[in-house]
Image: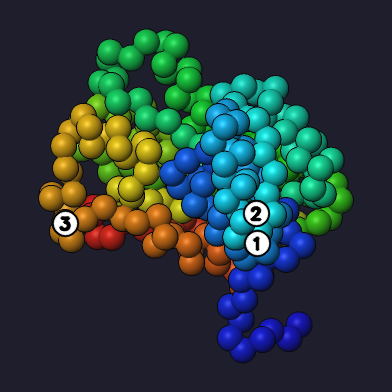
Amino acid sequence: MTYPLPNAAHDLSGQVALVTGASSGLGARFARVLAAAGAHVAVCARRTDKLDALVADIAAAGGTAQAFVLDVADQDQCLTIIDKVEAALGPVTILVNNAGIPDAQRAHKMTPELVNQVLAVNFTGPWLLSTALGARRIADGRPARIVNIASMAAYEYQGHGAALYSTTKAAVVRMTEALAVEWARYPINVNAIAPGAFSSEMMDGMLARMGDISQSFRRKRLGDPAQMDSTLLYLVSPASDAVTGTVIKIDDGQGNR
């Protein structure tokens, strides 16, 4: 096979991408980035009003997107959403498992209901979506790129009340590695991005509880979601054809390493 020089194209024309948790924050940014690169984007979340606004924004910028209601905590919805998206847009070739929720509580104070909700959204949903897509692409032989949004919390935890969140994100990292190995015989690449503290709706809630945590960071700033654009595009583009089972950490040097 002959590769261009440099082999770094990000053209996603003809691709269909499904992004969860797309109603705000990182998910909305990811959807805009994929659409700007030429993909037809299925934006999925529970809040339809915000999804409709996002679709309008993407269309105004020259992209293509369609809104789909998806509660990642609902297993039945996770198992049927790909059928709905493919009926409307064609075969899904890119999946971004972005939806996630914090726990914001000490481990010993969490109710079983909250435990189940965090597990469902942060791990079970991404697992079901990934395996549902994997089964389809294994059956038809088409390539697929799965990008799971993990977190630096998978690698470090300060003990301030997010133990289950940290645990679920560690599970997402391991899921990424395990599915990459299981599907390596097929043209299905499974990778992850582990962000540090980036500006988002989830981060706004954390700042409201804890104050300006950025002053404890080496660079005294939160990350900007735009700083993840190139990594996302790399992982879903032909340029990363040999990359699978990899977790790329993007934390602006915030961590304790």
What is the three-letter code of the residue carrying label 3? Lys
Question: Does 74 appear above or below 175?
Answer: above
The image position of residue 206, as x and y in percent, is 27, 34
Residue projecting furthest to the bottom: 5
Local SS, label 1: loop
Q: Quadrant of the N terminus?
A: bottom right
Binning the other alpha carbons within 10 Å of mark 3 as few (below 14), some (14 to 19) or many (20 upward) gives: few
Question: Residue under circle 1?
Answer: 62
The image position of residue 200, as x and y in percent, is 37, 43
Q: CA distance from mark 1 to mark 3?
A: 36 Å
Binning the other alpha carbons within 10 Å of mark 1 as few (below 14), some (14 to 19) or many (20 upward) gives: few
Question: Residue under circle 2?
Answer: 59
What is the three-letter code of the residue carrying label 2? Ala
Is residue 65 in view? yes
Residue drawn at the location 76% of the way across and 40% of the way down: 85
Check if mark 2's residue and mark 1's residue have beta carbons within 8 Å.
yes
The image position of residue 253, as x and y in percent, is 24, 60
Q: Nearer the viewer, mark 1 or mark 3?
A: 1
